Amino acid sequence: MIRTRFAPSPTGFLHIGGARTALFSWAFARHHGGQFILRIEDTDVARSTPDAVQAILDGMNWLGLTHDEGPFYQMQRMDRYKAVIQQMLAAGTAYPCYTSPDELERKREEQRAKGLKPRYDGTWRPEPGKILPTPPADVPPVVRFKNPTDGVVAWDDLVKGRIEIANAELDDLVIARADGTPTYNFCVVVDDWEMAITHVIRGDDHVNNTPRQINILKALGTEIPQYAHLSMILGDDGQKLSKRHGAVSVMQYDDEGYLPEAVLNYLGRLGWSHGDEEVFSMPQFCEWFNLDHITPSAAQFNTEKLNWLNAHYLKLADNARLVALVQPRLEARGVSITASPSLEAIIGLYKERVSTLNELADAAEVFYIDLHPQAEILAQHLTPEALPALAEFVAGLTDVAWEAPAINALIKRCIGNHGLKMPKLAMPLRVLLTGQAQTPSVDAVIVLFPRERVLKRLAAIPYN
Ligand code: GLU
């Protein structure tokens, strides 16, 4: 049974890199009919907040990355970590160390002064035949892991290939602080073990932790999971993705009008490929996804491509669903939506032409507010040759059948009578009705409005 986990630290929002890690872990489990576990690594109490936990849960929920177990909170598992520490002390794979922080710092300084890499000097490390100093009465000990001193720790990373670290490079890691609280790497190890994780898929900022974690897992005599370290995501400009790049929190993409399926599809292709396939649903992604086609190099974010995918999914989306997504956006802008024109009809007409829900809201907004088209746009399109045709069109509107073909016929009659080409009349109509020169076919736009609203908008200009 394949078991993966996503293990965010709740110190901020669910950012786009975390979301991709979650997606790959989730999809790998789904592909294999396995289980996906959500674990909140909240042991950094100074930086973890309930708001950040909620933001992570909201982000996962918005993306639809459902977990089969959890969320487990590390702060609720302290007793378990402490029990394992006792077990390791008893087994001799961990030991108490009484070197005080001051003394440790002093020794490090000495090592640095000698040009050496600062490391724990092993004073309290038990060895066969070694006599340890007498523990001082007033120093509460930390607990250190007794890391092997020779050989290498190696793993075949499923993304990066074989990685080997000499044990001599690794210190005896502190696994419990002087107050008894377990440290970060130790909690991860105990959890990955007890949650029976088979594949650890995570960001490559954790590569350095992996040899330490493997050594502790070995000392516990447990199975070692497989590791897949995902390369980082760079921004559009090739720099490390950060707040500078705007939307890095997943929920900000929601705010900016992206659909979750577009973000998921986009993230799926960020560092993974299946031939040339660019557009795929999540069931399709889960069917294809494996760890063999993840690129070990950094992936670069491309907002244009995300916009293109979002436009694609907007076209496919059901109109009623889009109404439910656009309506709150309009309400948040203080726009009150009336029954007529119908928001659903507006969306049906405009969804092919926009890249985000916010652009859809922009397009819909002009149908509901008092419109004051800009003077320059009016001057540009309301040319003297257009005005008589417009006047005839307005006169004809009062009794034309309220449907696009009849309105189209009226437009054609008016331009015919005045020897004009279509845009000469269509452009001023667009501008007067929507404030914009770019709209779908003008007869289709006109019939979205009730007749009186069109007459009112068109009456706002002098025709001679
Ligand atoms: N809590 C870690 C983080 O948010 C992830 C740890 C892991 O995946 O092993 O970066």
Image (cartoon, rainbow, N blue to C red):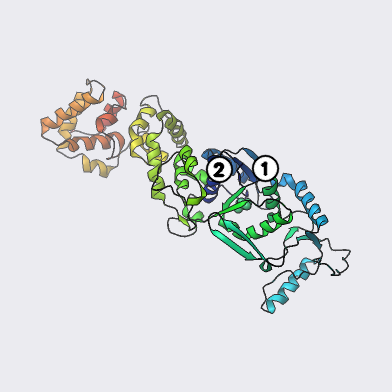
Reading the image, the residue beneath label 2 is 26
- Mark sitting earlier along the chain (2/1): 2
Estimate the x, y position of residue 446 in percent, counting from the top left.
28, 29
Between 135 and 363, the one lying in front of the other is 135
Q: Image quarter for residue 101?
A: bottom right
Looking at the rendered structure, the secondary structure element under dot 1 is strand
Helix, strand or loop for disc 2:
helix
Q: Residue at position x 44%, y 30% from top?
A: 321
Q: Quadrant of the N terminus?
A: top right
Mark 2 and mark 1: Cα distance apart in space: 16 Å
| Position of residue 104 in the picture relative to residue 423 (left or right) | right
Q: Relative to 138, does residue 283 appear above or below in the rendering?
A: above
Is residue 459 at least partly visible in the picture?
Answer: no
> Mark 1 near ligand 1 (CB under 8 Å)?
no
Of residue 444 and residue 332, the one placed in the foreground of this image is: 444
Name the residue located 48 percent from the left edge and 39 percent from the top edge. 282
Residue bearing mark 1: 72
Of badges 2 and 1, nearer the viewer stands 2
What is the x, y in percent for residue 335?
A: 42, 33
Q: What amino acid is at disc 2?
A: Trp
Say which mark, if any, is on residue 91. Answer: none
The image position of residue 424, as x and y in percent, is 18, 38
